[in-house]
Amino acid sequence: MTLLPKFSVSLLHPRFWPTWFGMGLLWLVVQLPYPVIYRLGYSIGHLAKCVMRRRVKIAERNLELCFPQMHAEERQRMVTKNFESVGMGLMETGMAWFWSDRRIARWMDVSGFEYVRNVQAQKRGILLIGVHFLTLEMGARMFGMNEPGIGVYRPNDNPVIDLMQTWGRMRSNKSMLDRKDLKGMIRALKAGEVVWYAPDHDYGPRASVFAPFFAVDQAASTSGTWMLARMSQAAIVPFVPRRKPDAKGYELIMLEPEFSPPLDDAETTAAWMNKVVERCIMLAPEQYMWLHRRFKTRPEGVPSRY
């Protein structure tokens, strides 16, 4: 069972004051008009690209591995756009946590939500596939405004951030589950709930199998999708929260549900799931989290890709 964080007086200790100050500053900034936030976020992204050189190298390497046919100049443009999205992602975290429903709805369009309603009419749980876009927090908030569900997350090491992210996400959702709480996820899905799940990162050798991902033949891919889908019989529904250009807002795009995914074994399911993830990413590739070392786990004896 996942125990959600609660406020305690210990969080007022001086060592947490910088975090509280940062949260207050973020709250203040996102009170600005959205077009101003948009320009500010992109400016922060350009600054981050100058400072976060290691992450720039990781993003470049990931794009090189996934899209070997992409010209170097195009790859550099993609990295620049990606870091603009990194800066905007920080702003969107504050927007998702601190904006009212009314303000978010003003900047949001939704398409394909009838897929969710059709699955719910069948009294079936939904494994909601939300890959790691830099719009992740806004995506969770926007979806929850339309249909509150249950989020799956990794508790933050900083207890103040952990408290605030849980509070922010619970503004439009029913509950949160630790990503290690597999039993809790299965119970929720069997009860007909919507459970948000991200199967696209490298979670290490113990929880992974190797499957193709874009041009990478052996990408460590979570076996969790296979276990959850097999044990819950939930429908799988991918969604994409896409930022529109020129400060025009956001699109929440629901894709067609899959009622019978291939479940022969973990490798087969992972290979199929990676194709779904690829389709999602290509709807907004510059907004995906390329900064993550997606291919850090390698078969035994095989050298690092980084």
Image (cartoon, rainbow, N blue to C red):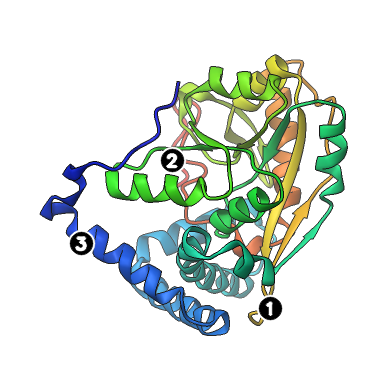
Residue 78 spot, x, y in % from top left: 60, 69
Q: Residues within 10 Å of mark 1 (few under 14, many from 20)?
A: few
Q: Earlier in the sequence, mark 3 or mark 1?
A: 3
Residue 94 spot, x, y in % from top left: 45, 64
Kind of residue indicated by mark 3 = Pro
- Residue 248 has which mark? 1
Residue at 87 percent across and 27 percent down: it is 122
Residue at 17 percent across and 43 percent down: it is 10
Q: Front-most of 27 and 275?
A: 27
Residue at 84 percent across and 25 percent down: it is 260
Q: Earlier in the sequence, mark 2 or mark 3?
A: 3
Q: Say if mark 3 contacts mark 1, CB within 8 Å.
A: no
Q: Does 148 appear above or below 93? A: above
Residue picked out by circle 3: 18
Kind of residue indicated by mark 2 = Ser
Residue 91 spot, x, y in % from top left: 47, 69
SS at mark 3 in the image = helix
Q: Front-most of 30 and 276?
A: 30
Quadrant of res 28: bottom left
